[in-house]
Amino acid sequence: MGKDNFLIKAADPDNVAVVPHAGGLQAGVLLDNGITLLEFVPMGHKVALTDLAEGDRIIRYGQTIGYALHPIYAGAWVNELNMAMPAPPDLDAIRIEPQIASKPKPLTGYTFQGYRNPDGSVGAKNVLGITTSVQCVAGLTQYVTRKIKEELLPQYPNVDDVVALNHTYGCGVAIEAPAAMIPIRTIRNIAQNPNFGGEVMVIGLGCEKLRPEKLVPSAPEDREGPSPILYMQDPAFQGFQEMVDGAMELAVHHLEKLNRRRRETCTAADLVVGMQCGGSDAFSGLTANPVAGFAADLIVRAGGSVLFSEVTEVRDAVHLLTPRTTDVAVGQALIDEMKWYDQYLAWGQADRSANTTPGNKKGGLSNIVEKALGSIAKSGTSPISDVLGPGEKIRKKGLIFAATPASDFVCGTLQVAAGMNVHVFMTGRGTPYGLSMVPVIKVGSNSTLSSRWFDLIDFDAGQVATGEKTIEALGWALFHLILAVASGEKTVAADKLGLHNDLVLFNPGPLT
Amino acid sequence: MGKDNFLIKAADPDNVAVVPHAGGLQAGVLLDNGITLLEFVPMGHKVALTDLAEGDRIIRYGQTIGYALHPIYAGAWVNELNMAMPAPPDLDAIRIEPQIASKPKPLTGYTFQGYRNPDGSVGAKNVLGITTSVQCVAGLTQYVTRKIKEELLPQYPNVDDVVALNHTYGCGVAIEAPAAMIPIRTIRNIAQNPNFGGEVMVIGLGCEKLRPEKLVPSAPEDREGPSPILYMQDPAFQGFQEMVDGAMELAVHHLEKLNRRRRETCTAADLVVGMQCGGSDAFSGLTANPVAGFAADLIVRAGGSVLFSEVTEVRDAVHLLTPRTTDVAVGQALIDEMKWYDQYLAWGQADRSANTTPGNKKGGLSNIVEKALGSIAKSGTSPISDVLGPGEKIRKKGLIFAATPASDFVCGTLQVAAGMNVHVFMTGRGTPYGLSMVPVIKVGSNSTLSSRWFDLIDFDAGQVATGEKTIEALGWALFHLILAVASGEKTVAADKLGLHNDLVLFNPGPLT
């Protein structure tokens, strides 16, 4: 562009716009809209486009994101110090009226090379997962995973990796507490993620509350070969080394089955893409999230599935989403997930304002209302066909709201449980996020970050802000990248570097 | 012993006693007390010593552990199916009346070889800890820990290990919620564990809620050399490899300082031993826990510190502990921790009966009352000199109640934060537990387990049940083992095998 004196407006009615320039803009700069900046405004932050009186609405994305705490002149910096946060939408007052005019226009002819599973799902990777029924066995699981990787994996070239699905679920979780079903179903559904090909093996202790049989993907009578479960307390084992030998033997059986699998041509309808953002800035809602939303619409048009999540980042925009639900029951389920979370936060004497991090604010997001309006952009414009509770598994195609906390690792873990085969993660501040079982495409919301973190960010959406690229062009490019990653043709940065987070369960219930 | 027809009574008034024999005892066996067994009773389970009418008290450890649900004849199996659980002690009705007759008799002349720290604490290991201010950086921390271990550690022979102190604390934690102080102080105090020698380095992201400066052991102005904090978002880093290089450079500085340290003679007064049990059975309260309690008394007599924990395993026996507190304030603090936990469990619609696992019950522990009475045996008989909230750091010598959940990994993590330098872990069912920064001595409560898990259990307390050894003899042996492990002379099973659990934070507050 060359010119350094323009702002970016998110929607026509807005009375604030955002500084897109690295380094911000200095006081005295004459903007191309005729306004002179009254003070320095950092990159990603908002400038008032008109004079605002005390109490006036501050409008971004065409929605009220706050009220002026005192008079603000055109050209001034608008931030969390001079605006009050609006109340969240009253959930009981929202009338659920689905208003879907027409079905998304079908999109055909897009394919990828995936691993088709017995249950009809498709894996983007071919990974041996080793899950556990209790955290007590984590030491053995880590030990044998390392040993399998070193001694066995090289003999099975079609198997991508061996992953210990360690978690912190143990007998300390109060299993009768109503909320305990969330971590339990999460662990069970993680084992059924398509990228494990139905071949997860289970290491149990023997005396735990959560029975290992519940983690086996299909009924034991349907399977050939040995039981996929090994118990450390099995009296047959004399000492640790015999447990290790037992696990190695079991791994050989599963590796042989996984190694015989081959990628085959699948249509984009077999994609299940989890969308998440972490470390957002004011560009996230202008660049990365709308680009992801455009790609999401393409996937849904192709018959595939897209998950979006993060309850506290949807809560303040939920009235914009209920009209997009396919029927009243889906709309009500969406409202119910918001209500559950309101109560959960109230228990702990917190509310949705606990979301928005110092990084968000530094990046120009003044409050959770502004963050939510930018966050839902990643859901695109498609109808919302289903709502999943935390840890539930996908049961319909299309655009799906999978209710999760916004906490990145917890959200990702729950999307693994929901059954995503590819993950797209948008970041503005920079979050070095990665999962071992699902490829994570990291999308930068601004080019400053994307170029500085050149070996950590997979896709730069920042070019939208500079006007070099359109949302449409980058949305198509991201869609093609998703297909290439799902095919194993492109390796994401996190996998090149081996940067993988542990899974983190959501346990809203108490520990004993 | 040879004879297979005796039971073990815990205290004189008891009307039940426990079968100590591997494999249990068959119906029809004539016991040495003249009673004939009416049915098969498994090892670790209780036999009625007298006829009991419906509603009669069932007494073990001299305390009521339940009420007969229907008539039970002498020689019958007493278990959770034929006994009702008593109500917990009413916390508001307990009168706090410290009744300490005399100070523990001093014990002198016992020493170990430890690493003395600038703050006066003593390490049993010399470990480079790498902590983090936010879970986002876990990938980098793991990456550099592996690289430091492979490339640098061999050059520093006096440094025992390099440990990534990864955790699941992130900006998703509602930082303003009152309970959020628990995970925050836990992370801060873990970095001050004596086994890190005050040389922890910190990897931060840059935009997180929890400032990395808060994790640095001493004030930055007091320290020589570079800041111990590295931020991934530092604009000086162009890409991931430069971050890795920065972390390696910082590690060299800390490794050099740690490598210059030498063990010196310290008295047993410098011990801070964390006592915990996991996977308990009916023997735990007869063998392993009383042996640990005897050793605890020796440590306290020598001027050292012992932590015991696990609120739900103390709750039903708290009226037996308040008379042992050194003053009313300590007694009140103990009651207050019980009250806080009652409320915390009630929130989640659970209560203390959620403790006792299927493994406990299979091992003969019928309910939490019986479990608690056996559990507190590990506190010995010394006065209780202080009570710590979850994640607080030790501030007094002597026997200390450190309030924690009973969940093994969470309890261990909070005892690391409290400042233990050696850990003793009692198990009956078998739990393969281990920590990388603190040596864990695993004590088996029965010889069947200790011999089958010969390479996982460090110390067999089961010989008390067979009458081969006394509690006193094994208590002294455990005390000597603790000193040898603290000196680095003996290596525990978990360290030999490299079996180390991740730390697990206690976050009773909500996620956003």
Image (cartoon, coloured by chain):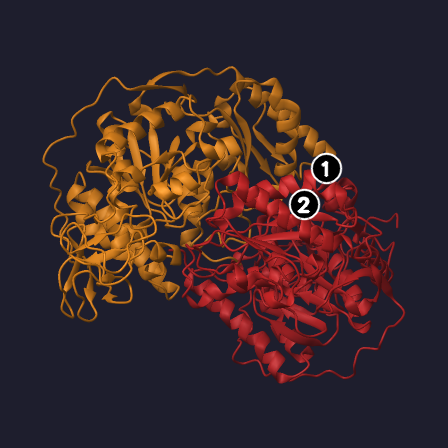
Chain colours: A red, B orange
- Residue furthest to the left: B101
Residue drawn 37% across and 55% down?
A512
Tell me if residue B131 comes above or below residue A349 in the rendering.
above
Q: Amino acid at mark 1?
A: Phe
Rounded to the nearest whole Å, what is the CA distance between mark 1 and mark 2?
Answer: 9 Å
Q: Is residue B313 left or right of residue A407?
A: left
At which x and y percent is residue A9? 76, 62
Question: Contact (CB < 8 A) between labels 1 and 2?
Answer: yes
| Quarter of the figure with the N terminus of chain B | top left
In the rendered structure, the answer to whether residue B269 lies left or right of residue B49 reads right
Residue A50 seen from this side: yes
**The numbered mark 1 sits on a residue in which chain?**
B
Q: Secondary structure at mark 1?
A: helix
Name which residue lies at 28% across and 19% down.
Answer: B110
Instruction: Give the residue number, with chain letter if any, for mark 1.
Output: B240
Where is residue B449 drawn, in percent x and y?
39, 43
State the residue in front, A38 or A325. Answer: A325
x then y, percent, for residue A22: 76, 45
Front residue of B168 and B320: B320
Q: What amino acid is at disc 2?
A: Pro
Q: Is residue A23 above or below residue A332?
A: above
Q: Residues within 10 Å of mark 1 (few under 14, many from 20)?
A: some
Which of the numbered marks, if any, corresponds to residue A207?
none
Residue A352 visible in the displayed image = no
Q: Which class describes the residues within 10 Å of circle 2: few (<14), some (14-19), or many (20+)?
A: many
- State the SS at label 2: loop
At x 36%, y 34%, the residue is B459
Residue tagged 2:
A432
- Which sits in the foreground, B428 or A500? B428
Q: Residue B285: image x %, image y %?
A: 26, 46
